[in-house]
Image: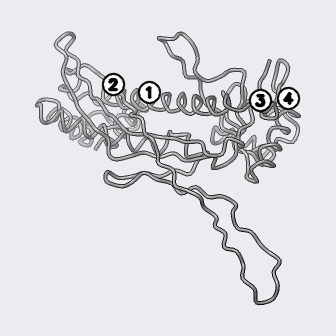
Amino acid sequence: MANTFFEIAEKLKNREIDPNSKEVKDIENVLMEMASTEDGRAELAEVIGIYLQEQINKIDIAPLMTESKHFNFGERPEFRLKKKGIKAYWIAPNSSTPKTKNYQETLGMEFETLSVRPECLLDELKAGRIASLRELLTDGTEALQSAIVEKVFTILGQVYNTQTNKDYLTVCSTKLEKSSLEEAIDKVTYRTGKSAIVLGDKILTNQIMGFEGFTNEAKEEIRQNGTLGYFRGARIIGVNDVYDEALGKSLVPKDRLFVISDKIGYSATYGDAKTGQENSIEDWSWNARIDMDWGMAVTNPKGIQVIQIQ
């Protein structure tokens, strides 16, 4: 249902549909009916929760670098950790071979609650103005995306800060240098045996386009899809700025790139979204609260190389 609201609202915004069409009037009437009763508003909050939970699958950057899974209520959130434990031996004919295993333990995932509480004027919903609902869904999605981006950078920064080996840091002077990026990619792939991912602020990652060796095909991918493609086999992930108004600062580092190994750990969501809603008599607004459980764990800290621009 939320997808229908959103699709119609987008078509109206882009003038792709007649505002007086039956399709628009029908969806407006549905919204008016839902917004007019307490039970209807509770149902609307559930619809919004389902929509935002679907959006997590599209906006979450953690699965781009981790093994990812969704656990239903009642399931045990565990991942089996693997290791290179299988060994080969030279033995005498018909003698026994020691047993070896390629796993060591299971990892229990710890979750945090990701919560968002977008609001709009209740009268707008009661009037069937789906543009107001579209803005609520858009704002909620953007807020979730910003929160996840902040959390991923926080986790990677915490893991990196536990490293004392200077080899995990590559320093550039004043701007990102091609040789430094190549060095970082080489170190990550050498230490882990896996391909690398370059993650950072889009202003920094965009500088990679100017490097020799960045193919025309990759530049065409940028033009068509808005993504940075690959450099030296490493996938480039550039993220938009996340600014915390309360703290008065950006939460995505402007002077640091993370070069990390593919599948550096695990990420997961758990259960279904919890939803609630309420009206405010202060300004006659309406808000829906949506809570979702999310977790990420880095299990291979050797797969992080930081490029610091001084």
Q: Identify which amino acid the numbered label 2 is placed on.
A: Pro
Is the C-beta separation of discs 1 and 4 under 8 Å? no
Image vertical order of residue 225 relative to residue 178, above or below: below
Judging from the image, what secondary structure is the residue with disc 4 in? Answer: loop
Which of 15 and 103 lies nearest the eye of the viewer?
Answer: 103
Which of 112 and 292 lies nearest the eye of the viewer?
Answer: 112
Q: Which residue is mark 1?
A: 143
Position of 48 compared to 145: left or right?
left
Mark 2, Cα crowd under 10 Å, few <14 / some 14-19 / many 20+, is: some
Q: Identify which amino acid the numbered label 3 is placed on.
A: Ile
Judging from the image, what secondary structure is the residue with disc 3 in? Answer: strand
Q: Which residue is mark 3?
A: 307
How far is disc 2 from disc 4 in space, using C-alphas?
41 Å
Image vertical order of residue 284 relative to residue 46, above or below: above
Q: Which residue is mark 2?
A: 118
- Looking at the rendering, in which quadrant would you find the C terminus? top right
Q: Identify which amino acid the numbered label 1 is placed on.
A: Ala
Question: Marks 3 and 1: which is nearer the front?
Answer: 3
How far is disc 3 from disc 2 in space, using C-alphas?
36 Å
- Spot occupied by residue 40 in the image (x, y as percentages of width and height): 15, 36
